[in-house]
Image (cartoon, rainbow, N blue to C red):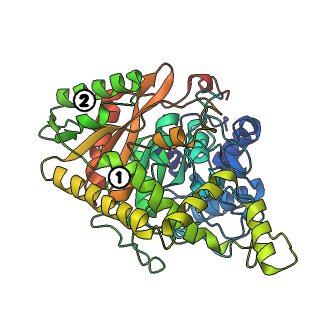
Amino acid sequence: MAAIDVIGLTAERAAALLRAGECSSEELAGAYLERIEAFDPALHGYLHVDPEHTLAAARAQDQSGNVGLAGVPIAYKDLLSTKGVPTTAGSKILEGFIPLEDADVVARGNAAGLVSLGKTNLDEFAMGSSTEHSAYGPTRNPWDQTRVPGGSSGGSAAVVAAGLAPWSLGTDTGGSIRQPAAFCGLVGLMPTYGTVSRFGVVAFACSLEQVGPMTLTVRDCALLQQVIAGGSERDATCVGLREPIVLPEPGRLDGVRFGVPWAELEDGVDPGIRERFDASLKLATELGAELVDVELPYARHGLAAYYVIAPAEASANLSRFDGVRYGLRVDGPDLRSMYEATRSAGFGPEVKRRIMIGTYALSAGYHDAYYVQAQRVRTLIRRDFDAAFLGVDAILLPTAPTTAFPMGARMDDPLAMYANDIFTLPVNLAGIPALSIPNGLVEGLPSGLQIIGAAHTENTLLRFGAAFEQAIGFDPVPPALRGGAA
């Protein structure tokens, strides 16, 4: 059988090849493993790969008969617990940790017959926007290896963009699926809060984060969302779906009303990003949609509110990493010294920064002034979106105000790093879904179009995304990969 060309191979197409008998799951997994071995050392998208485990799982799918998505490979962000496989959350404090059970989304992937290729790199505990904060080294962007892939799910984005996996799962706490998807020319979905189980996700900020797909196409995104979404008895915050996810077909947008918050675009958006966004607005009208000015007056305060709420939750969640129960332990003369030495050695600078911010915001003298006030702003942001959706079907914004920035450019400027999530953070605070799709190139680098919907409108967003995807005609394969290189 001829060698399998996995560059630009969608998961939907891979499943069709398997069902038609044009290749086996073992051969398909082997093709990806060969590329991982050849090209991942330069990109560093994966933290853990076990070829023997992957090929054994692929053979098991071949023996059981490939139906549906069975036998299709997948990559998992290393924030998702995997039974018997290291899960580090990108942190030294969890180095060598082996979970005893799978996260719900991993279990659902296993039940669907998906074959794990490995665990992908991330900003430590998902705290970052560039994957430069990983304790195991940064990931590079396949479109330009001098630039970041975004974060925190940068590894999950890079491996799909580089042809090292057909699709992947990431987590989104403030844009951590959508922003790296935009930087790497992918489709990324932040689902409605509570539609995907968080059981087995190493916790950062529980009221904000969701697991979601990162894929080459909108249809692949819908397929993977079908696998992972649904209620769970192991996650009390997971309410499941109101309606099944359906595969979208591209078409026109006649009668659709898109809201555009023009006031949010006045400052801080790179000219090239604004040009591509305006071009997509023009495409929307050509497809039959109407553009409506909407106001989100409190969205501009989302950045400030997020960086009180998220660190506060992180401060509480990360208190469990103390050197007693699991992970790194640095001995000291007494218990307090052991705690201090373990956390000092195990946590990186960004994690320590956020723990300190969160602990301060929750302290007795400042709880009402900071944390309670941020929660009030969060409520106002949600009300802004609720009011806007009374008159529009979805809201359009750029996914990020810039393209992928050079590695190291913002490491010494946390505020500039945080500001890159200005268009994505309000969505997490509101708990509503948003889809990022590739929106063309800006000086040779991908940009993203973000489509935001009311709660439980994933099918609507996927349908709109498919229409834009066809009209934009973006090729998700980086030019350097078209010849099979990295």
Using the image as rendered, state which of residue 329 and residue 39 is in the foreground. 329
User: Can I make out residue 84 in this image?
Assistant: yes
Between discs 1 and 2, the one toward the N terminus:
2
Using the image as rendered, state which of residue 52 and residue 310 is in the foreground. 310
**Screen quadrant of the N terminus:** top right
Q: Percent from the top left, x then y, of residue 371?
A: 42, 65
Q: Is residue 389 above or below residue 318?
A: above
Q: Percent from the top left, x then y, of residue 399?
A: 40, 39
Residue at the spot 20% in from the left edge and 35% down from the top edge: 252
Residue wearing tag 2:
281
Q: Percent from the top left, x then y, of residue 214?
A: 49, 47
Report the mark closest to the observer, 1 or 2: 1
Q: Residues within 10 Å of mark 1 (few under 14, many from 20)?
A: many
Name the amino acid type tagged 2: Leu
Q: CA distance from mark 1 to mark 2?
A: 20 Å
Name the amino acid type tagged 1: Val
Residue wearing tag 1:
427
Residue at the spot 60% in from the left edge and 62% down from the top edge: 355
